[in-house]
């Protein structure tokens, strides 16, 4: 039991909570400290939203192209981000261009950058509203788990669709008496154009 050194009474009876082994803080002080942390986090997320807007514009106009291979490389040099963080900032900035609800939620501090970063891995304009609700309802860890599951389902659906498309392909060759042949192909138009130009 922690005892207040001045009164020799248990800390809980005095409305104190243990902050560390050496220091006691009033519960109201701890609550104010927590509020200040949360408020600052909202401001940081709003600033991050602005930073991502600037990165997207800088990337679109090729501001990095005077000696750098990519916008991410430029961010590593100029801003001091690590390579992975720089690539993620560019990816998220680009994604938010088509996801205005997520962009606005980040700018207002309603969603953290960690949540938005995760959501932009799977969000499309069609799924944005649903995923925004997920972001508002869960912790960043919860959102990450949902996104991992969503990606797994997307990959499975994509594999099924690809298998169906592949199974639907066909090529029939009809030899003519003059030594030539006629061919009939059943493929996606994009594949036919690619095959014809190759």
Image (cartoon, helix red, strand yellow):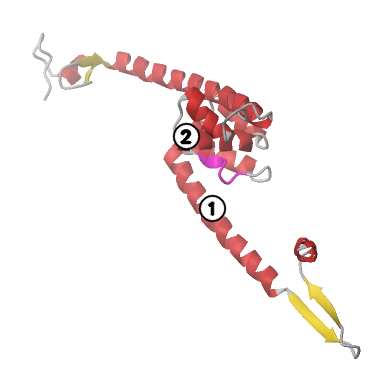
Question: In the rendered image of this protein, does residue 38 appear above or below residue 168?
Answer: above
Q: Secondary structure at mark 2?
A: helix
Q: Is residue 120 magenta?
A: yes
Q: Earlier in the sequence, mark 2 or mark 1?
A: 2
The quarter of the displayed image where residue 49 is located = top right
Count of picture labels: 2
The quarter of the displayed image where residue 70 is located = top right
- Quarter of the figure with the C terminus: bottom right
Locate residue 150 relative to residue 168 in the image: left or right: left
Q: Is residue 139 visible?
A: no
Residue beneath label 2, please? 85
Question: Most prominent secondary structure in the magenta stretch?
Answer: loop
Mark 1 Cα-neighbour bin, 10 Å: few <14, some 14–19, many ≥20:
some
Residue 41, position in %: x, y? 45, 22
User: Is the C-beta separation of discs 2 and 1 under 8 Å?
Assistant: no
Residue beneath label 1, please? 151
- Quarter of the figure with the N terminus: top left
Q: Which residue occupies the extreme top position in the image?
A: 6
> Which residue is drawn at the image coordinates 56% and 28% (left, top)?
106
Nearer to us in this view, 189 or 132 = 189
Locate residue 9 relative to residue 104 in the image: left or right: left
Look at the image and give the residue range highlighted in magenta. Answer: 118-123
> Which residue is drawn at the image coordinates 15% and 18% (left, top)?
22
Nearer to us in this view, 87 or 18 = 87
Question: In the rendered image of this protein, does residue 176 appear above or below residue 162?
Answer: below
Kindly report which numbered mark, 2 or 1, lies closer to the viewer in this rendering.
2
Residue 65, position in %: x, y? 62, 30
The quarter of the displayed image where residue 194 is located = bottom right
> Which residue is drawn at the image coordinates 54% and 33% (left, top)?
72
């Amino acid at each position: 039991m922690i005892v207040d050194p001045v009164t020799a009474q248990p800390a809980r009876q005095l409305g104190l909570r243990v902050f560390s082994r050496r220091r006691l803080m009033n519960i109201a002080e701890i609550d104010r400290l927590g509020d200040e942390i949360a408020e600052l986090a909202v401001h940081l997320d709003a600033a991050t939203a602005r930073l991502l807007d600037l990165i997207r514009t800088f990337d679109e106009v090729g501001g990095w192209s005077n000696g750098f291979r990519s916008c991410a490389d430029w961010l590593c040099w100029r801003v001091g981000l690590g390579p992975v963080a720089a690539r993620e900032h560019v990816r998220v900035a680009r994604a938010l261009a088509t996801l205005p609800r997520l962009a606005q939620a980040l700018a207002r501090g309603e969603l953290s950058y960690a949540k938005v970063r995760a959501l932009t891995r799977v969000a499309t304009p069609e799924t944005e509203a649903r995923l925004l609700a997920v972001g508002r309802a869960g912790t960043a860890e919860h959102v990450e788990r949902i996104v991992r599951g969503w990606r797994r389902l997307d990959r499975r659906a994509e594999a099924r669709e690809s298998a169906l498309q592949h199974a639907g392909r066909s090529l029939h060759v009809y030899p003519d008496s003059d030594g030539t042949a006629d061919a009939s192909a059943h493929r996606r138009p994009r594949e036919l154009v690619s095959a014809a130009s190759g």
